[in-house]
Amino acid sequence: MTITQVGSPSRGRRHSVALRAGALLVGMHVFVGLLTLVWLPYDPNAFTGGRLEGASLQHMVGTDRLGRDLFTQLMIGSRIALQVGTGAVAVGAFIGVTLGILAAFASKWLDDALAATLDILIAFPTLLIAMLVVAASDQASLWSAILALGIALSAIVARLTRILAKRVLVMDYITAARTSGSSWPKIVFIHVLPNIWPTLSVNFALQFGLAVIAEASLSYLGLGAPPPNASWGRILQEAQGTVYTAPLGAIAPGIALVSLAIGVNLLADGLRERVDDRLGDR
Amino acid sequence: MRNSALFAAVLLAGANFAPITLAQDYDPDATIRIGSLYEPQNLDNTAGAGQGINEAFNGNVYEALFQLTDAGTVEPKLVEDYAVNDDGLTYTFTLREGVTFHSGDPLTAADVKHSIERVTAESSQSSRKRSLSNISSVEAPDDRTVVVTLSDRSISLPYNLSYVWIVNDAAANITAMEDGTGPYTLEEWRRGSALALSRFEEYWGEAPTNGEVVFQYFTEATALNNALLTNAVDIITSVQSPDLLVQFADNPSFVVTEGASTTKEILAFNDRVAPFDNVQVRKALARATDKARLLNSIWGEYGTLIGSFVPPTDPWYVDLTDVDAYDVESAKQLLAEAGYPDGFEFTLDTPDYDPHPIVAQFLQTEYAKIGVKVNINIITANEWYTKIYQERDFEATLQEHVNHRDIVFYGNPDFYWGYNNPEVVQLIADAEAASNEAEQVEKLTQANRIIAEDAASIWLYLYPQIVVSAANVTGYPVNGLNSQFFAYDIRKSN
């Protein structure tokens, strides 16, 4: 029972539209993001055109106030979004799963205390927690944004992990493993994690979408990665004042952001349906 | 949908205006609604109220002994006449007769003494406190005479006094109330939204050409623009981006004026620290800055290039744009001579509001061409004040300097940028002690040239001052010096 079984082709043909559309959208961004590592149409910081040029063959979505090519910036934006999404989910998963498992195994009062703390943390909007973390760090950077979002997401992951793990811990085979003398790390890694992984991974996909949007919001507010990191949120923010003269500058990063967020959500939906099918199959 | 219907209605209304007849047919009791982004924090200009209080109150609610006019001249206001002793240390002012405060009290010399001492007081947060620090005493020998004694000669005293509101000495708390002598009284201040002034019927001078003035405050430029488009305000006091002007530029219902501003966008180095203590390094960076391209990026067709801190409206202006003109090759050469053939790296503390972040990115790309790496550190306006202005903990920063006649900052080695050239300090001190204006202008022009040659900072460009109004409104100030916005000549036709 590992994640490889989630994608087993035997089931869910009728659900595959969401999964395919999601995979296509996300795949497109992944492709563009990887492409930026080896090739870019222009130097993203070079003044390659005039002020606020419209769409043309040279500049597919025009230029910004400084005459920089917006398409190049949007491509880099894909990479930054994916970096932040992956990074934040990784941080959130690491902290969240660790805390969740600890809570599940902990004594009753520690468990209650952790659960209450998590509930309080979840009551705060993700973005607000992320803003607080950024404010506490010395200098805003891509890493501080990733860390902030990861910490903000970890509460949700921790709560989910705790509930899922507790459900698994009362199973007969766990009791069997315990009585046969398995150490608790062994129980966690052999029995608990593989069992809760499918549900968690769907949640990670959703968190990824959340992180991408939250990063754009942070950058829009000037709390994300500092310039010249071409985050979509920052491009959007810089285009805000010129929305009447150069609307493309605001529309294009918006479309990029929406397409990735929808893609990730469709992907998560598709995954969830498959997991549901498989679990329902039991 | 609803918006476009409103917009069409505005256009139709606009078509009815006959711009030619505007000057004569105005409504003497009209309400002028002025849209602004600068709501004051309180009503006292010595208590950190911000530039919004100058905009609303200078010349409108409060008057000073002298007035800095919109044209940039200094003219007597509450002073009828004044005399200076031969040593230039004693000024005797004779006050205008028949002036009353809004509360009904007559203006006396004691009020003037109180008002000047209010600005020079320990607790005062006035930005002009330092320029008045050479006042050693203020006496009121009779009701109409004020004698000001100075410790050093100060040719700018009348100018500096134009910043000192004359307040009734019996007035209690002027952070929330007012008691001035101006043509308007404060009618109502609704925090967060509007400040209403109404005509003061007992005003000593010429009566305003309108009945009421309402400053309406917005926190967002686009909302302010929409307010003018939908006829919710009559005037916008200062438009902060050329891209917001397209809605007004070719529309006969609106008038766009570009006046002279004193707001300078500058790259200020911390001249105390390496490598910026080296003149050649500063000059190299100046030559690596394509200011014309930057100005065009930020302001399109608007704004002015400057070669130093002095704008064309100051008497000591000379065109210095040729000093350290854009030349990447000579920039590289200078940098090599200064001992940085491979460039260096520095942190640019950048306030988080427009245009600073975009200017920082521009400089980052420009300086990369000569091997200088710029790390952009985004900070808030508050952080700027504590980290840079107070603690001087920075390498370089961006800031817009709004003050009028502020070259004197370069004569203060303690100022945040730490420029310390004894010759300039001396020239600026001598200019202040000059016995006539020609001498003052000569000294300050000399100082101006030296700071430019020293590239004390990099003066990127001068902001334009853009006012937009509905076409049926005329008579407003176009230059907005010292953020003032005199409302008493504004006329509105129906």
Image (cartoon, coloured by chain):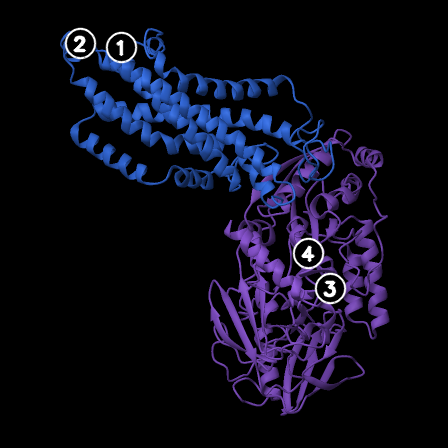
Q: Secondary structure at mark 2?
A: helix
In the rendered structure, which amino acid carries the disc numbered 4?
Asn
Circle on res. A177: 2
Tell me the subunit letter for badge 1. Answer: A
Q: Nearer the viewer, mark 4 or mark 3?
A: 4
What is the spatial separation of the Cα atoms under label 2 and label 1, in whole angstroms?
10 Å
Earlier-in-chain disc, 2 versus 1: 2
Q: Which residue is mark 1?
A: A190
Q: Is residue B236 visible?
A: no
The verdict on a common chain for dots 4 and 3 is yes
Q: Which chain is purple?
A: B
Earlier-in-chain disc, 4 versus 3: 4
Q: Which residue is mark 3?
A: B405
Q: Nearer the viewer, mark 1 or mark 4?
A: 4
Q: Is residue B209 visible?
A: yes
Which part of the image, by quadrant, shows the C terminus of chain B? Answer: bottom right
Mark 3, other Cα within 10 Å: few <14 / some 14–19 / many ≥20 = some
What is the spatial separation of the Cα atoms under label 1 and label 4, in whole angstroms?
73 Å
The verdict on a common chain for dots 1 and 4 is no
Asked if residue B417 is positioned above or below residue B343 in the image, the reply reads below
Tell me the subunit letter for badge 2. Answer: A
Q: Position of residue B54 (x, y in %)?
A: 61, 68
Residue at position x 36%, y 22% in the image: A269
Q: Secondary structure at mark 4?
A: loop
In the rendered structure, which amino acid carries the disc numbered 1?
Ile
Residue at position x 59%, y 66% in the image: B34
What is the spatial separation of the Cα atoms under label 3 and label 2, in whole angstroms?
83 Å
Q: Quadrant of residue A277?
A: top left
In the rendered structure, which amino acid carries the disc numbered 2?
Ala
Residue at position x 77%, y 58% in the image: B310
